[in-house]
Image (cartoon, rainbow, N blue to C red):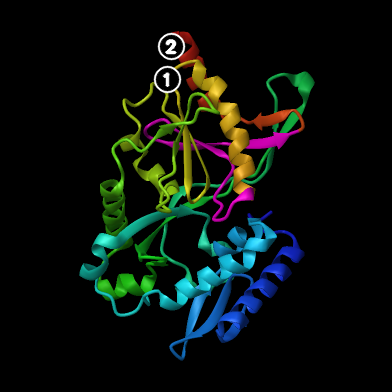
Amino acid sequence: MPWSLFSKKGDEDEFETLFRDACARLGIRLQEMSADKATILKDNSPSSLYLANIKPRVLSAPVQDRPAILEDFLRASLTASSDEGHTLAEVRDRLMPRIGLPFARHALLKEEVPPSRPFIQGRAEEQKKTRNAAQGTVVIPEVPPLETNVVVDEPRTVWYVRHKHLTEWNVGFDALLSIAIENLRRRSSPNPLIRIDQMPGTFACETGDSYDAARLLILKDLVGPWPQEGVIAVVPNRDLLLCVRLDSLDSIRAMKPMFAFAQRQSTAMGYPITGHALWFDGTIWEYIPTRLEDKGVGVFAPDRFVLALDRLGKSGS
């Protein structure tokens, strides 16, 4: 089953009605609209607005707030700088990385899909035999692929670097991504993680700059000293990074509340990424699939992670 943020036709219909009404109130001419993109007239020229991020933000907000959120989005789009006519020297210091769900899942033209690099592979739902034969099999949830893009940071919005920019600037995507990661590193506080009193053992990075999830790319800079078995992190949406250090048996007690929180937040807020946990041992990223269940949260730990926990227990930390 393809990964999709929306499965209810009613959500699509409601968003389209809200969007058309907001355009009408602001006097914006809407030329056409699909599930993933709208084309408006900006300075008498067609301008494409991509809806993958604003749509969940609107639909997860209280009903009374939805019109204002859309109006703010449209005003920002009208005043935002175009992605045309910029030199690399001009935007170099404003290049920033983004981690998120793949653009390829949308019905976009090939030239509209931003270049990217895989961050972590997704996996389809699967059945797996338990270690205890009497328990039969378990169904491990589907997890989505995540990718890294590059954006140009503007005062109220961003625009994505696309293939046309790579051609115009005569540069490869990997080179731009390296610049973007260094910009993110430079903009990040050396101590951005704060303890969450309600979830002992859990740390949060919530700066409000819209790049907190992207800080997975520089996690080793943020967590020090690096824990024995790495870090468990969650990025339920663009604006939140939570993590637990795997350096003591207390880590195990801290994980489940964070897992449950991430699953709920991934469907309750805008700009969703994934409710599943991610484990970074310092070298390799690996999913730890989770699922909300009647008795709490189900955790489907991969074998490599189970071995890491065993080592943690034997170390007596």
Spatial distance from mark 2 to mark 1, Cα to Cα?
Answer: 7 Å
Q: Quadrant of the N terminus?
A: bottom right
- What is the x, y in percent for residue 144? 58, 49
Q: Is residue 16 magenta?
A: no
Q: Quadrant of the C terminus?
A: top left
Tell me how many marks there are.
2
Q: Residue at x 32, y 56 (%)?
A: 177
Q: Which residue is mark 2?
A: 317
Residues shaded magenta = 268-293
Q: Residue at x 69, y 61 (%)?
A: 63
**At numbered mark 1, what does the secondary structure look like: helix, strand or loop?**
loop
Does residue 250 sit above or below 65 in this rendering? above
- What is the x, y in percent for residue 93? 24, 60
**At numbered mark 2, what does the secondary structure look like: helix, strand or loop?**
loop
Q: Are marks 2 and 1 in contact (CB under 8 Å)?
A: yes
The amino acid type found where label 1 is placed reads Asp
Q: Nearer the viewer, residue 21 or 105?
A: 21
Label whose residue precedes the other's in the sequence (2 or 1):
1
| Quarter-of-image position of residue 13 | bottom right
Q: Which residue is mark 1?
A: 247
Residue 52 in sight in this render: no
View extreme (front): residue: 64
Residue 189 in sight in this render: yes
- What is the x, y in percent for residue 8? 75, 60
| Quarter-of-image position of residue 191 | top left
Q: Is residue 49 left or right of residue 17?
A: left
Does residue 82 sit above or below 288 in this rendering? below
Q: Is residue 270 magenta?
A: yes
